């Protein structure tokens, strides 16, 4: 791996982060006259903890990592943007990404004026390791892998990801947004083996907390320090921090039950969809959605929208011709979807 100094944008290397008086005083009790807050309207009048210490302690225990290896963001989308801002020189650097994959890697690249070199998955949706490594050049700072991948739904072989981690001397971002639906497949446990690995996860999917916006990036402490230096000081508001602590403690078993139920529903939904004459293929999924190849994706999509059932038309995406992406819903939602689809002619 190139050193972090070599990988970082030059202006970020020397950036002096915003600091507040509460960096020195971290107690909860006191007369706080340092931040120009209003003394009334407790508890909303106070700025949140910029270091999210209590929440990180809970997540460290949950994920079995060191708190110093955790960055918390306003969704993992914030972490996606921040790694570009940390490592990629606008107009000069580039990143490598698999194709098809989650759209925000491209959007965040464009907003940061960074070029994305896209490398197609193989026809069976596996990583083309040789091709991915082949397009790397001296200005390639990051390589994006999403596993389970959105929209294809599959996890990639761990040996392939490890080959890339060993052979690419920049940052490998492994987006595991859906990994809670693929037990045993996370590479978080390998964090200490690979100094160039950044794993991203989220509370938006299996944990059912998309509305409070809480995403995670895990990496060696030096990388986490960099992300923390460039984030907005108060990126996680007090409502999110408080609610997340509550829900993580309360909902651990519930989340496991939801995962089991959704995995059962995924099997049922796939077997029902398979019976429809206009469904050609259902791809194996390690996530909470199914990629379904159909004869007429646009017409099916519009037919469902008319019935207020919204799925995702992915038919214009690389390797996904004819494909619709369907989130596995509750048993009731899946029944409503199937009842509607049976009427499609
Ligand atoms: N990564 C992937 C692969 C996703 O599909 C999504 C959301 N659709 C995200 C990240 C963003 O998650 P968050 O809600 O944490 O911003």
Image: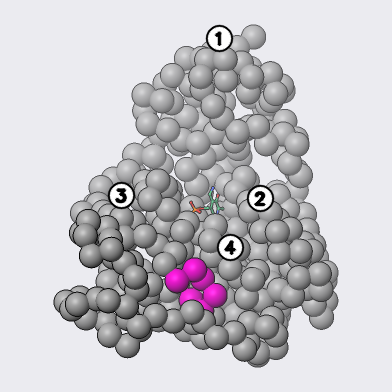
Q: Is residue 191 left or right of residue 97?
A: left
Quadrant placement of the C terminus? top right
- In this figure, which colouring scheme has been used for the structure? one colour
Mark 1 highlights which residue?
343
Residue 259 point in image, percent of width and height: 36, 46
Closer to the N terminus: mark 4 or mark 1?
A: 4
Query: What is the magenta range?
Result: 228-233
Q: Are marks 2 and 1 in contact (CB under 8 Å)?
A: no
Closer to the N terminus: mark 2 or mark 4?
A: 4
Q: Residues within 10 Å of mark 4 (few under 14, many from 20)?
A: many
Circle 4: element type: helix
Q: Nearer the viewer, residue 35 or 132?
A: 35
Closer to the N terminus: mark 3 or mark 1?
A: 3
Mark 3 highlights which residue?
255
Q: Toward which corner of the image does residue 321 lie, by quadrant?
A: top right
Q: Toward which corner of the image does residue 132 lie, by quadrant?
A: bottom right
* Mark 3 vs mark 4, CA separation in Å: 25 Å
* Mark 2 vs mark 3, CA separation in Å: 26 Å
Residue at 23%, 65% in the rendered image: 39
Quadrant placement of the N terminus? bottom right
Asked if residue 112 is positioned above or below residue 33 in the image, the reply reads above
Mark 2 highlights which residue?
103
Mark 4 highlights which residue?
80
């Amino acid at each position: 791996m190139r050193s972090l100094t070599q990988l970082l944008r030059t202006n970020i290397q020397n950036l002096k982060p915003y600091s507040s008086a509460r960096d020195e005083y971290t107690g909860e009790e006191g007369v706080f006259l340092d931040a120009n807050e209003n003394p009334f309207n407790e508890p909303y009048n106070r700025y949140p903890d910029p270091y999210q210490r209590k929440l990180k302690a809970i997540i460290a225990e949950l994920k079995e990592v060191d708190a110093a290896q955790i960055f918390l963001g306003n969704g993992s989308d914030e972490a996606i943007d921040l790694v570009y801002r940390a490592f990629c020189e606008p107009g000069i650097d580039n990143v490598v990404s698999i194709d098809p994959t989650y759209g925000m890697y491209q959007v965040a690249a464009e907003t940061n004026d960074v070029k994305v070199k896209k490398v197609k998955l193989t026809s069976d949706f596996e990583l083309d390791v040789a091709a991915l490594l082949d397009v790397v050049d001296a200005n390639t700072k990051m390589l994006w892998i999403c596993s389970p991948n959105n929209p294809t739904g599959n996890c990639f072989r761990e040996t392939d990801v490890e080959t890339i981690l060993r052979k690419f001397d920049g940052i490998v971002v492994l987006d595991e947004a859906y990994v809670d639906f693929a037990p045993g497949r996370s590479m978080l446990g390998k964090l200490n083996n690979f100094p160039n690995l950044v794993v991203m996860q989220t509370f938006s999917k299996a944990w059912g907390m998309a509305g409070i916006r809480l995403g995670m990036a895990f990496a060696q402490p030096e990388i986490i320090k960099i992300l923390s230096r460039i984030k907005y000081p108060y990126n996680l508001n007090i409502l999110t921090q408080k609610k997340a602590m509550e829900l993580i403690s309360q909902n651990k078993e519930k989340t496991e039950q939801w995962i089991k139920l959704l995995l059962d529903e995924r099997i049922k939904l796939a077997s029902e969809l398979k019976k429809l004459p206009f469904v050609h293929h259902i791809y194996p999924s390690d996530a909470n959605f199914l990629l379904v190849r159909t004869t007429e994706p646009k017409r099916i999509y519009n037919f469902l929208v008319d019935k207020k059932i919204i799925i995702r038309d992915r038919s214009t995406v690389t390797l996904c011709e004819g494909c619709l992406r369907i989130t596995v819903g509750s048993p009731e939602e899946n029944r409503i979807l199937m009842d509607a689809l049976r009427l499609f002619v």
